[in-house]
Amino acid sequence: MSDHRFSSVPTEEEPGCCHLSRKVKVCLCVLLCVLLCVLVAVAVVVGVLMWPRATPPRAWNGTGSTPHFSEIVLGRCFTYTQLLRPELRHADCGQIGKAFTNAFLSKDPCHSSEQDYQLLLKLTSQTIPCHSSVFWSKSTQLAHLYTRVRQDMFTLEDTLIGYIADGLNWCGDAGSYEMNYQSCPHWRKDCINNPVSVFWDTVSKRFAENACGEVQVVLNGSVSNTFDKNSTFGRVEIHNLHPGKVSVLKAWVMHDIGGVYSYHTCSSPIIDDLKFILSKRNISFTCEDDYRPIKFLQCVKSPEDSSCRK
Amino acid sequence: MSDHRFSSVPTEEEPGCCHLSRKVKVCLCVLLCVLLCVLVAVAVVVGVLMWPRATPPRAWNGTGSTPHFSEIVLGRCFTYTQLLRPELGHADCGQIGKAFTNAFLSKDPCHSSEQDYQLLLKLTSQTIPCHSSVFWSKSTQLAHLYTRVRQDMFTLEDTLIGYIADGLNWCGDAGSYEMNYQSCPHWRKDCINNPVSVFWDTVSKRFAENACGEVQVVLNGSVSNTFDKNSTFGRVEIHNLHPGKVSVLKAWVMHDIGGVYSYHTCSSPIIDDLKFILSKRNISFTCEDDYRPIKFLQCVKSPEDSSCRK
């Protein structure tokens, strides 16, 4: 009889740690190899996704996206819905932020369309009372100061969606998951269907469609293009006012205090153009030069001007 | 001779997977046990940290923290530093948000102190030009409309820290890592050294300390306590104006348009009280009733009032 010691060592085993058999060793090796392959594959995918592009993003002629765009959007949404207009506190700001960025991320920023913004529009729908819509053209500061005093009146930038987007810039890139902070398409030098232009056309159209009762527009009589058919007001808004809802569009033609030259007034032909377009759409029109409540706003800065003296 | 087949199976081995020896099995078992213990320990710790408190947070008499406080703070900080005052673009909004919440989280909300806010103050320091500080008391809307028109002038709420915190509410709890959204201490019914009151006292003090040149205050002559020694203006700000820096404090006593009763004017004894306190501190004082630029602001809403007629 051979001398076989009872031992836990299998006959075919090779010396090594843990006293594992060859089969087990092979098993483990294969497992390790597979794991390694998976890790390498994951690393490659992550690397491809995260690594700065070999080719830099397309360089446009316009300013890049606003830094911290998403945080600003979220913070403004909560500020508006929790503090400014609590009747909207049911709005889901997380969803709104996502719908906003999804409208342009990973898309060609020269082929933006109204459809891209449909979900965002849906999530930010808001009823503006009749007789309270205030349009404006070449008069942004005055118009917004006016609605700041008259909290019962709304420019587009006093609505939730306008408040969120006011002053921001944004665009993406078809081949990237990120916003382009370096540059964005310039409306004139690159392309008109860029994310920002399309956004404002889209929300302006809706703002006009929803306006009802007496609506007003603040115009600037101290510039040459007081009524500009290429402006958002002239190109989009007046064409989307609903004749059945809007009883009258009241224009207020304001003139700079101490301005050297007063280009246009309510009697100017350029205002007749506006009146004509509206009448063809069956919308009444009235006009007032230097509407007094807004004139008072101008007097805050220039109290000594003759037009401000009692 | 016994028939021993060559095999890779060790003699003492028990049938089982992977043909592991008893020692290895024991090793693995111990390892698994240790892992399990660690997981359980982690789960317990996480559970203790995250589980809703067995005892509900202390119920105070004041409104709870503003929902989405942190997102609003962050969004406002970025809006201010990127869009409104880009000269502050260097500010670290992430750090500012953290310093803000760290000032009151996990602390007794009846023992807040100036020290809690020191880091936040440091991160939001800002130079306000001379002749541009506007204080206010019982006149919040008018004062802020005024600085909205006069962008070169600043109330506390036009500074970075004031802009961030304006209108918000916040408090924590000594035994919790979370903000209390149910209630917060009421200044009068609970305790004066609550996080919000201490915050505004702290930043108002700094705002006053930093004011230089001609400074102004908008007062309300249509209320009985036109100059209120218990207001932030009367209790904190006038006592922290620096005589060496402030050349004069100009008071504008405004009266409501169409108001039934005009309580106080510049000639009222209550204004003498203010003048007296300032003279003891060697600060000059002037007073004007119904300062015209701000009167014009009131006329925006009431253009037909006699005080507004040309």
Image (cartoon, coloured by chain):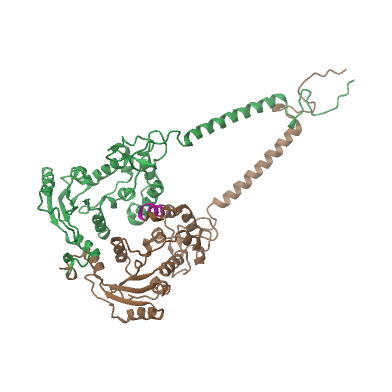
Chain colours: A brown, B green
Report the quarter where the C terminus of chain A lies.
bottom left
Farthest-out residue, right: B1
Left or right? Give the position of B84 relative to A35. left
- Tell me, yes or no, if residue B99 can be seen here: no
- Tell me, yes or no, if residue B25 can be seen here: yes
- Does residue B121 belong to the magenta stretch? no
Left or right? Give the position of B21 relative to A296. right
Left or right? Give the position of B137 relative to A205. left
x, y percent for residue A301: 22, 63
Magenta span: chief secondary structure: helix
Q: Which stretch did the figure color magenta?
A: A76-84
The answer to whether A119 is drawn above or below residue A15 in the figure is below
Question: Residue B80 or A80: which is nearer the viewer?
Answer: A80
Residue positioned 27% across, 75% down in the render: A288
For the image shown, how many numbered marks are present on the structure?
0
Left or right? Give the position of B255 relative to A171. left
x, y percent for residue A32: 67, 38
Question: Residue A294 or A30: which is nearer the viewer?
Answer: A294
Q: Please tell me in which quadrant of the rendered image residue B54 appears.
A: top left
x, y percent for residue A220: 30, 72
Q: Please tell me in which quadrant of the rendered image residue A159 appears.
A: bottom left
Residue positioned 35% across, 34% down in the render: B108
Farthest-out residue, front: B260
Residue positioned 30% across, 49% down in the render: B162
Question: Residue B182 or B8: which is nearer the viewer?
Answer: B182
